[in-house]
Image: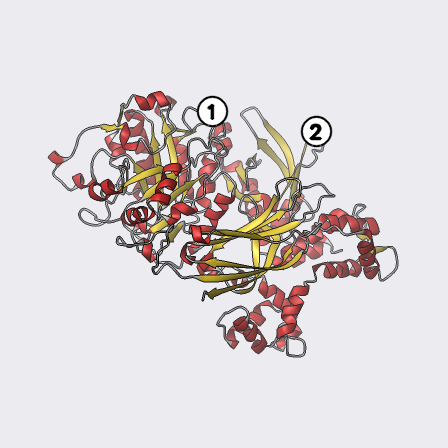
Amino acid sequence: METNGTERKKNGLEGDLDLQFLLQGGDLLKVRSPSWKKTRYFRLQEDCKTIWHESKKYFMRNQTFTLDDISAVRIGRQSEGLRKYTEEQVEGRCFSIMFKGRRKNLDLIASSEEEAKQWVSSLEKLISKLNNLSCQKKTEHWILSCLRKADKNKDEKLSHSEVKNFLRLINIEVDDDYADMLFKECDKSNSGYLTGEEIEHLYELLTHREEIDVIYGEYAKTTGFMSPENLVDFLMKEQREKLTLTDANNIIEKYEPDENVKQKKLLSKDGFLRYMHQPEALILNSDHKELHQDMSQPLNHYFISSSHNTYLMEDQLKGPSSTEAYVRALLKGCRCVELDCWDGSDDEPVIYHGYTLTSKILFKDAIKAIKEYAFKTSDFPVILSLENHCSVEQQQVMAHHMSSILGSALVTSPLGEGMPTEFPSPEELKGKFLVKGKRLNKLETIFASEAAAADDTDVTEEDESNDEDEQKEEEKSKKKKLKLAKELSDMVIYCKSVHFHGFEDARTNQSFYEMSSFKEGKAVELAEESANAYVRHNVDKLSRIYPAGSRTDSSNYNPVPLWNAGCQIVALNFQTTCTDMDVNQGRFLVNGKSGYILKPAYMRDTATDFDPITLTRGNWLKHKTLHIMIISAQQLPKVNKKKSSIVDPLVKVQIFGVPADVAEKETSPVENNGFNPAWNENFQFDVYVPDLALLRFLVEDYDSTSDNEFVGQFTLPFNSLKMGYRHVPLLSKNGDRLPSAGLFVHVMVLDAE
């Protein structure tokens, strides 16, 4: 088995001072409340991937987490806990470890500012190194850590029973005969246990990819290796890529691990496999990962990644509200966040889900968090969707906070000269914040004489009665007037909330910047019964859709039918993991994760006849036939952490899009093998409107007696598919990459007859 030293050398970490610091570790103060602040000893374990900590009094079992679990490390009092439970003077000594998923932050205080900085920089450096490891290296890492776990007595040898334990850990169940055969084949020394090279041989036997051998053998015509010409042949015939001999030579130079083979300008099987795992060779077109669309169209010509109840970490009845929820949504590329504002104590407005037990956060803290993280993932504009339940006095405080915190990034007057007639583009609005909410008057009054400008502070409740329907019934029935502060009203420029009275009324009476919000039920009804009218409405207006108030568990709805109707701001509960959220992330996976996806041309034309339901003939009909072969999977994670539990994986291939395109097909399950299951099953799909279609690969653990369990998934736009033999990365429920897991498939898209 490889030593830790060898592993560090391979990762380029040997002799690294930051690594030495983490391996040595030290005492940190863990903060949970004003009274709960306890010293814990933290250090990195020898595997260079796991951090454990113990109490001064006794060893605390299972108090570990891996570097893979960490989403960010932040210096200072940036978390809500640290802001609430510590004083300003310890700012420089504080730092927080933020985790993926719903796990709570770890809030820590070091003994000095230098030490806090050292912890943060060392952790960030190590996480960055691990993230940059190749897929092959990650697999090696994973298998080595399983080998270590299997080696119970830590003698760097594996007995027969330890080998069986190891096979279970890597998610493969084999019968005793096969385990005996494997063991005998590797135990060259007949010593009754495996050591050194024998363990390496076991690793090679297990990671051998027969399907890769077959493909490689087909094209390796030069004395058993691939020449640049062979590689070009493979790339053009199988992968449908137009690459030159120069490109092939570059691939060999970059990915061939054997220097002797590289000097001969050849590609070995190992080099070929390494290349096949690179981002440019995966199923998602790597050109589409970058910003590649025209960003100079009016804002409403884009689908916009949007969040509902952004402040919630969990459900909307009693879940915690948190500024961290805004940070997470923004880092996922969300461009429209919701702020549910209510009067708070000490004249400070608060954000929470009204009339429920959800906790409260200060409006100003939310705005600060939004400002700090708004443009880390995307440079394009962020829309602040205000649900305003505040008194005039506290609305003035809201306006003051937005103005003072966001400064010149806040759009408070129309761009350019004179009264605009259409939205500015995402490009023109880079780094800007737009406020969506009620406005006392029309935008035109800014350019009219002062006398003509309305001076009323009343807005009838009906103006927004269909915006968010979560107010008490008796409040609604009063039909009271809501007072609106002029300072807040004046900040609403391009996203004025108005009531929807039908498409005809909107066409004749609404200005382009006046937008309506639709509850999902109403929106789906319009998308089904008046699809073309909805598409046309959304050519020059914005529409925001939000989940029904009955979804108290913060579940989501399917966003696809609403996108099909041209709706731009289809708001989902980002805090909830589900198929709908996977599809949302798949839609916005491309175009540089900018949170803006340009709608097809026929959804940007006021005279369009496009109807996603009836699908009459037009330039949107580009009938394709999709052929997919699900070949194999690699290193699927265990779903059930019990040692004896092995997955029985099956793969579902799903198409989301216009009704005519929606489809699902699945493979048969493979029993007891999550390590290297093979299917070799073919599927065919008709796709009529590829511009709006998404493809989802879902891996489940088959269960004959109850629902299958989720293992991993990957969703991408149909038009971003690459053809040929492709690896498909797999994401966890939270949307994070599963370190070593993946599918291997063959894709072919043909024009239908």
Q: Nearer the viewer, residue 682 or 180?
A: 682
Tell me the kind of residue under disc 2.
Lys
Residue 200, by quadrant, is: bottom right
Instruction: Tell me where residue 647 appears, x and y as whole percent.
Output: 68, 47
The x, y position of residue 72, in whole percent, is 53, 44
- Tell me if label 1 and label 2 are in contact, CB under 8 Å: no
Q: Is residue 538 above or below residue 7?
A: above
Give the secondary structure at mark 2: loop
Amino acid type indicated by mark 1: Leu
- The residue mark sitting in front, 1 or 2, is 1
Number of other residues with Cα within 10 Å of mark 2, as a class: few under 14, some 14 to 19, many 20 or more: few
Q: Would you name the residue on which mark 1 appears? A: 357
Residue at point 38%, 22% (across, down): 345
Residue 197, visible in the rendered structure: yes
291 up-or-down from 445: above or below? below
Residue 622 in picture, x, y percent from top left: 40, 61
Residue at 62 percent across and 43 percent down: it is: 708
Q: Which residue is mark 2?
A: 57
Local secondary structure at mark 1 = loop
Measure the alpha-carbon separation of dots 1 and 2.
37 Å
Q: Quadrant of the N terminus?
A: bottom right
Relative to 450, does residue 8 appear above or below in the rendering? below
Residue 277 position (above or below residue 375): below
Q: Can residue 588 be seen?
A: no
